[in-house]
Image (tube, rainbow, N blue to C red):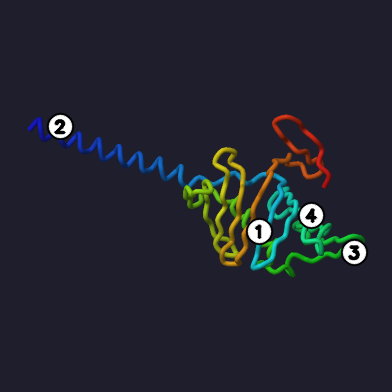
């Protein structure tokens, strides 16, 4: 009788141990990346057979600035997204577009939408890939994957396969959250950024 009782207790203890480990593993696997912050980065956006290089700044959900560096035909163009709409400037030309007139599948809007969507998610599906930790989600533009550097936890890639969009992200720098007084923060110095 004592042997059976001891075996039953041991079996329950092992079962609880495996169940507890599985629960801890699921929490770690589903923890969302910390994207709900202001940052600036260099990006290379490829879609279909096109490529655009730009400097992108996220100030908060739905508030983005982008300055296109290449191709030459678009170099110098700035695009500003805000809750009031989108402003596009190239040289002395400028025009505004209300948000309701922006196609949700447009390349830049899709990229911003995916990152804003991920920033608001408390949990996401996760997989360890050769490129680094990758989180998967779905937004109004379709499914997406965000890859992070395993050493710095900074965003390195955004993929939106339904729209054939891929974004390589380089040199991510966090910014203060005050839109009117944006400063770059690094481990060695603090400088004022020009918006």
Local secondary structure at mark 4: strand
- Vertical placement of 24 versus 111: above or below? above
Q: Are marks 3 and 1 in contact (CB under 8 Å)?
A: no
Q: What's the CA distance linking mark 3 and mark 1?
A: 25 Å
Residue 91: name its quadrant: bottom right
Q: Name the residue under label 4.
A: 67
Q: What's the CA distance linking mark 1 and mark 4?
A: 15 Å
Local secondary structure at mark 2: helix
Q: What's the CA distance linking mark 2 and mark 3?
A: 82 Å
Disc 3 crowd rating (10 Å Cα; few below 14, some 14-19, many 20+) is few
Local secondary structure at mark 1: helix
x, y percentage for residue 40? 72, 46
Q: Name the residue under label 1.
A: 111
Q: Is residue 180 found left or right of 59 in the rendered image?
A: right
First in sequence, mark 3 or 4: give its number: 4
Foreground: disc 4 or disc 2? 4
x, y percentage for residue 64? 74, 53
First in sequence, mark 3 or 1: give its number: 3
- Vertical placement of 95 versus 175: above or below? below
Give the residue at x 78% y 55%. Answer: 69
Residue 96: name its quadrant: bottom right
First in sequence, mark 1 or 4: give its number: 4
């Amino acid at each position: 009788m004592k042997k059976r009782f001891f075996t039953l207790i041991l079996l329950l203890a092992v079962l609880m141990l495996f169940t507890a480990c599985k629960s801890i593993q699921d929490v770690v696997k589903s923890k969302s990346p910390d994207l709900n912050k202001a940052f600036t980065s260099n990006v290379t956006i490829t879609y279909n057979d096109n490529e655009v290089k730009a400097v992108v700044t996220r100030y908060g959900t739905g508030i983005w600035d982008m300055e296109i560096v290449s191709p030459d035909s678009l170099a110098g163009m700035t695009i500003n997204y805000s809750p009031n709409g989108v402003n596009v400037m190239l040289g002395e030309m400028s025009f505004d577009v209300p948000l309701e007139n922006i196609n949700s599948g447009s390349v830049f809007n899709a990229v911003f939408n995916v990152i804003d969507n991920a920033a608001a998610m408390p949990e996401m599906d996760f997989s360890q890939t050769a490129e680094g930790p990758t989180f998967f989600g779905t937004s109004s533009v379709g499914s997406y994957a965000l890859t992070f550097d395993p050493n710095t936890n900074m965003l390195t890639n955004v993929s939106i396969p339904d729209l054939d969009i891929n974004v390589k992200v380089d040199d991510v720098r966090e910014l203060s959250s005050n839109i009117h007084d944006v400063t770059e923060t690094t481990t060695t110095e603090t400088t004022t950024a020009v918006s």
